């Protein structure tokens, strides 16, 4: 009579190590792509906010005959996603120039995914810096 062997169900250590290696390879490929997506998405949100603030500046000059020097004067504050990753300021306000000028700037904060990115700017003419389009 042939004896039946009791075989335990489960995975061997080798099979488990192969699965772990495959998951590690997939994570190594996907994670940098995910981080790049986060950086691009944060940049797009900051660009949208700068355009909104620029529009508010143009309305402000119509109402007050001068550009605002602070975001608070515009009645605008960046949403958390922008303020967590960028420092947004109004620079280059010259209400005595003809025409008056301003530049809105979003500088990436250190210690955020945006660190190392270029500063985004838009001015009174709607001109954006080159990194806007990356």
Image (tube, grey):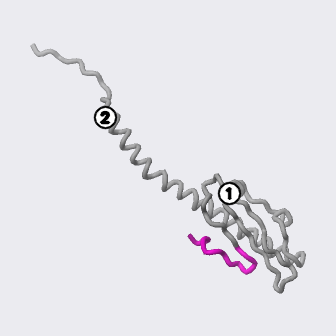
What segment is highlighted magenta in the picture?
A: 122-134
Q: Are marks 1 and 2 in contact (CB under 8 Å)?
A: no
In the image, is residue 82 part of the stretch drawn in magenta?
Answer: no
The residue positioned farthest toward the right in the image shown: 64
Residue at 84% x, 83% y is 97
The residue depicted at 53 percent of the width and 54 percent of the height is 35
Q: Depth check: 65 or 132 in front?
A: 132
Q: Quadrant of the C terminus?
A: bottom right
User: What residue would you read off at disc 1?
Assistant: 109
In this view, the residue in front, 131 or 40, is 131
Helix, strand or loop status at disc 2: helix
Q: Position of residue 111 (x, y in %)?
A: 64, 52
Residue plotted at (75% across, 73% down): 103
Number of marks in the image?
A: 2
Identity of the residue drawn at 9% across and 13% down: 1
**Snapshot quadrant of residue 110:** bottom right
Vertical arrangement, residue 41 with respect to residue 101, above or below: above
* Mark-to-mark CA distance, 1 and 2: 45 Å
Residue 55 image-quadrant placement: bottom right
Residue on which disc 2 sits:
15
Residue 79 is situated, as x and y percent measured from the top left of the image, at 73, 57
Q: Is residue 55 left or right of residue 38?
A: right
Compared with 28, 103 (above or below) is below
Q: Quadrant of residue 81?
A: bottom right
The image shows residue 73, relative to residue 23, as above or below, that is: below
């Amino acid at each position: 009579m042939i004896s039946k062997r009791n075989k335990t169900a489960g995975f061997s250590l080798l099979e488990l190590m192969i699965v772990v290696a495959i998951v590690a390879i997939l994570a190594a490929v996907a994670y940098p792509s995910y981080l790049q997506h986060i950086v691009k998405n944060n940049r797009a949100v900051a660009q949208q906010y700068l355009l909104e603030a620029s529009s508010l500046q143009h309305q402000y000059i119509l109402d007050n005959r001068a550009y605002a020097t602070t975001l608070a004067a515009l009645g605008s504050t960046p949403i958390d996603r922008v303020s967590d990753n960028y420092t947004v300021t109004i620079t280059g306000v010259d209400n005595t120039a003809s025409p008056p000028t301003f530049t809105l700037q979003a500088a990436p904060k250190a210690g955020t995914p945006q660190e190392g990115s270029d500063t985004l700017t838009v001015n009174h003419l709607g001109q954006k810096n080159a990194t806007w389009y990356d």
